[in-house]
Structure formats: C-alpha cells, structure tokens
Image (tube, rainbow, N blue to C red):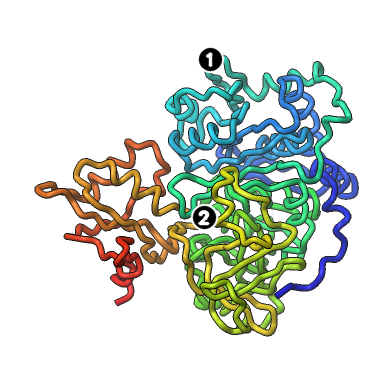
C-alpha cells in the first residue's frame, strides 16, 4: 500500500551540500539553541552553515576527500553540526557514532568503515574519550584523531588547529563534486547479527527524508536524541532545510527539558515513553509550565495507548511514529487525527513510502491482517556495508524486510504489533541479543546462554539473560556486570536481569525457543 504521492522530488537530486546551501540562503536566521555541559549557546542556521563551509576548507587542507570516511563520536553541539555540514559539502562519508559505544564497538566500526579520520571530545560526561581511543588498538586506516577540546593524542590534532588550516585549503576540482547517489552517511545499528550493521545512505535517500513533512506544525521543537543516532542526525541538520527553530541538549536531563519547554515556549517535542514520562514527572516536581506544548510524538518500543492518553491529559496531543535506521520515517501520526488512530496506530504512511504486509511465504495479506512488514520508498537505505547481509534483508524486487510485524487499515494507518528480529530496544537504542550472548558466553561460569527483551516501565525494554552454568559454578548479576565492564562494550548492553536455569527450551532443530523464555514475563 502506498501513501499519498510526493509533491516535488527535484530537490532530492541535489547533493546534500548544495541542498543545504540553497535552503540556508532562503532562511539564514533560523534559531538553534544548544544546552551543553559548558553552558548555553544560541546561534542561527546561517552562522553554523558559514562555520561548516570554513571547516570544509580546513578538512580539505588536512586531506579529507570525496568518498573518505570520517567517524564522529561527539555530543549534540555546534561543533558537531559544523563537522557534519563540512563532511557533506566535501562529499566524504559521515560515520556518526553514539556516545554509549565503548572501545569494542568503536573499534569494529572504525575498522569496517575504514575511517581515515575520527573526531571525539577530549572528555565529556566524565568519560575520557582519548583513553577509549587508545584502548582500541591498531587501526591501519585511521590517520588522524581530531579532538574537540584542549588535549590531543600523540600525532593527533585539536579542532581549533584544524580550523587554522582553512587558508591553505586547495581548490575543489569539478570531478571531486559529490553526486546524488554517492554514499554520504554510514550509521551502525545493532540488529540480529552479533556485530553492528553498517547502514548506507546516499545524498538522495537522506534528502528524501529531510524534504518530507515530518514535524506537525511550527517550532520551537525540543529533541532529546543524541547526534550519533539516526533521529539525532536528522534533527540536527533538518532545520537547515525546513527552517524549524530547534532546542538541543547534549545529554538527556528531564528537569532541564521541562525548564527549556517553559523558557523557549516549546511547541513540539518527541521521543520514547522514557522521555515523555521523565518530562512530565520533572514538570510536576519542579512546577514547570508545559502549556506551550501542542504535540509529543512517540516512537521506539513500549509505546501504548496509555502513553498517548497521558500526553493528551497533560494538554499536548500524543501521537505515534514508526521508522528505522534503514528507513528513517515510514509512518507518522498527526495531532488532527482522532484519538483512536493516534493511540492505537503508528500513524499514516509518509508520502512515497510503501508497505506490504505478508505471510511467511511473502504473499500479500488483506487489510487488517497481521503479518511481516516490508517497506520501500525514497528514504530507504541502499544496503549494508557487509554485502552478505543484503540477500536476507531485501526481497528480489527491492522490498526491505523490517523484521517487524504489523497490519495496515483502510485509512492507510500502520500498526506495529510485534517483531521477529532478535533485539532489545532499551530507551530507543537497539541492542543485539546475539552480541550480548557472545560477550556473556566468554565468562568461565557460562555453559549456555540466551538473551531476550524484558518489559520495563522506564526504558520500554531491558536486557535479560538466561544462563545455564557449568557444573559446580556459581554466577550472580554482579559478576555478570563486572564481566561486561571489562569487555569494553556499551554499559547499556549489560544484562539488568539474570535467570539461572538448568536448561534452555529448544526446537527439534536445536534453536532456542525465546518465545518460551519471554512467556515468563507474561504468564
């Protein structure tokens, strides 16, 4: 089923640097408010675009060229936006990395992406990022570590020193101009595989996302998403195209979010149920005025009709949306929709997006029937970095298998009801069950292990491990958590619940029946 047709796709054929430059010339004064550990910074899209152009010249002088990969593990800040803008203008491949990833994940991403450059803060949120980089080990393709801060690694360079190279930047040759179908964005997401999957987007697929209406009205818009996440990347740069006033935080802080809504008279926001509940609790406890909020868009796992009703009772229309790193926005709820649609569906299909609901043999099912969700459209990524994953990800005629289960209704609304893919979605971040199992299996006490998603009121889901220990061995949650701390993976992947069992339920072919394990949470 296809949503309403797209209006004008001519702009999508522009490389993102040209698209952004054209849009900023029309609207150079869009306000952007950054709330950072170091204080508040307010600027405009025009000022940041100029910073991005200067930084592009400096990065060229440092040797960054079209097609080169530059990894960026930075919080949401003006410097991050300038680096993103500069990378897209040059035609290099931007590799955003979420801040929660430790040396193990970052090392994998740097090696597979063959990144020539890496940008990190020297220190942020009490994390020494330079220590993290040093813990990764040999990286044959990495030439420079650019540090936002005062310290630099041996052979590295600070961002301030990079900016000083602007005057010596070489002229850009015409054959070096980025093209619409060049890969420009490489995002790593956890999925059913043990290692993160590299999701490749082009100038054309990203431009399609930015040019489709997504925000339900005028700003200011408050976003909680980090810059390394697909939503954080889009919210950081989309306002340069749409002219939406934005309010950013470099880390989620519910009392600060409530204060920012009151101070900036924020009209629109969104996030996971974790963000909504935190915002409402903080406003109640701090006596903050949220009356300016007209809409709160909910996504991620664990969204229920109760969350939509909770937003409605607080005076803002609750809506739901569905998207993936591979296809940023599939469906969106709008505040003028009836409550039944806003609360019980994940919104209408976006213009140009197509969805099929199919059975196990991939035969189309009638409206209202539940089945596997296949999607395609102009925002759909072009494939994974590891080409071996693509055969399973796509049908022969180009439909993407989302791994989610749902149904479509006659009004063109999509409802996500379950998922096939073996992941935990904790606070909006995907965590591969296989990756957690692989780390836990290296503990000497573990003979067999299975990891599933456990429902959680605060985060939607959390990591739960079922372990069969070796005979005579003891294991508790504290030991498991110390083991994960020593493995160098993101803290969020550490099991938060542990069941010691004599055996794991299996099918006749030997596959663990994870549905039986999850049934323990829904007796």
In the image, 153: left or right of 509? right
Q: CA distance from mark 2 to mark 1?
A: 39 Å
Q: Secondary structure at mark 2?
A: helix
Residue 476 seen from this side: yes
Q: Position of residue 61 (x, y in %)?
A: 76, 20
Which residue is disc 1 drawn over? Answer: 154
Q: Up-down: is 441 above or below 269?
A: above
Query: Alpha-carbon neighbours of circle 2 within 10 Å: few (<14), some, or many (≥20)?
Result: some
Q: Is residue 340 above or below residue 467?
A: below
Side of 193 where 480 appears, left or right: left
- Which residue occupies 77% across, 63% down? 213
Residue drawn at x 29%, y 45% as measured from the top left: 441
Query: Helix or strand or loop: what does disc 1 sit on?
Result: loop
Which residue is disc 2 drawn over? Answer: 255
**Image-based side of 70 in relation to 253, left or right:** right
Residue appearing at x 63%, y 83% in the figure? 367
Q: Residue 216 in the image: x percent, y percent?
A: 73, 67
Q: Quadrant of residue 461?
A: bottom left
The x, y position of residue 444, in whole percent, is: 21, 41
Image coordinates for residue 465, horizontal then vertical, percent? 30, 56
Please identify the quadrant where the C terminus is shown. Answer: bottom left
């Amino acid at each position: 089923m296809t949503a309403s047709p797209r209006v004008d796709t001519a702009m999508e054929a522009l490389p993102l640097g040209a698209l952004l430059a054209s849009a900023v010339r029309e609207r150079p004064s869009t306000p952007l408010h950054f709330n950072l550990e170091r204080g508040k910074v307010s600027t405009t899209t025009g000022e940041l675009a100029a910073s991005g152009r200067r930084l592009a010249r400096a990065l060229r002088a440092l040797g960054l060229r079209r097609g080169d990969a530059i990894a960026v593990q930075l919080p949401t800040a003006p410097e991050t936006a300038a680096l993103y803008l500069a990378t897209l203008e040059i035609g290099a491949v931007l590799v955003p990395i979420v801040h929660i990833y430790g040396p193990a994940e970052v090392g994998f991403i740097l090696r597979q992406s063959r990144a020539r450059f890496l940008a990190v803060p020297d220190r942020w949120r009490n994390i020494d990022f330079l220590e993290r980089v040093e813990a990764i080990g040999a990286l044959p393709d990495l030439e420079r570590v650019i540090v936002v801060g005062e310290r630099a690694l041996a052979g590295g360079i600070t961002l301030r020193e990079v900016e000083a190279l602007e005057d010596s930047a070489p002229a850009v040759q015409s054959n070096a101009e980025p093209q619409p179908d060049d890969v420009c964005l490489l995002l790593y997401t956890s999925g059913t595989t043990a290692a993160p999957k590299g999701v490749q987007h082009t100038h054309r697929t990203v431009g399609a996302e930015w040019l489709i209406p997504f925000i339900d009205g005028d700003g200011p818009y408050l976003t909680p998403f980090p810059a390394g996440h697909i939503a954080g990347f889009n919210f950081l740069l989309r306002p340069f195209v749409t002219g939406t006033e934005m309010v950013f935080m470099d880390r989620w802080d519910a009392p600060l979010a409530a204060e920012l809504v009151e101070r900036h008279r924020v009209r629109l926001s969104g996030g996971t149920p974790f963000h909504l509940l935190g915002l409402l609790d903080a406003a109640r406890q701090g006596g903050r005025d949220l009356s300016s909020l007209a809409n709160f868009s909910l996504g991620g796992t664990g969204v229920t009709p109760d969350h939509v009703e909770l937003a409605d009772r607080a005076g803002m229309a609750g809506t739901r949306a569905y998207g993936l790193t591979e296809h940023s926005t599939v469906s969106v709820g709008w505040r003028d929709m009836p409550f039944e649609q806003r609360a019980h569906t994940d919104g209408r299909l976006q213009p140009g997006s197509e969805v099929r609901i199919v059975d196990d043999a991939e035969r189309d099912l009638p409206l209202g029937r539940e089945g596997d969700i296949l999607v395609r459209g102009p925002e759909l990524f072009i494939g994974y970095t590891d080409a071996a994953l693509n055969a399973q990800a796509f049908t022969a005629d180009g439909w993407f298998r989302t791994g989610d289960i749902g149904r479509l209704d006659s009004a063109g609304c999509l409802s996500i009801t379950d998922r096939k893919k073996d992941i935990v979605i904790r606070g909006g971040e995907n965590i591969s069950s296989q990756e957690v199992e692989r780390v836990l299996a290296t503990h000497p006490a573990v003979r067999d292990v299975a990891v599933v998603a456990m429902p959680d009121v605060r985060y939607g889901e959390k990591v739960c491990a079922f372990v069969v220990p070796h005979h005579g061995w003891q294991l508790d949650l504290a030991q498991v958590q110390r083991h994960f701390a020593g493995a160098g993976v993101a803290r969020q992947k550490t099991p938060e619940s542990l069941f010691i069992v004599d055996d794991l339920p299996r099918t006749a072919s030997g596959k663990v029946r994870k549905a039986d394990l999850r049934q323990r949470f829904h007796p």
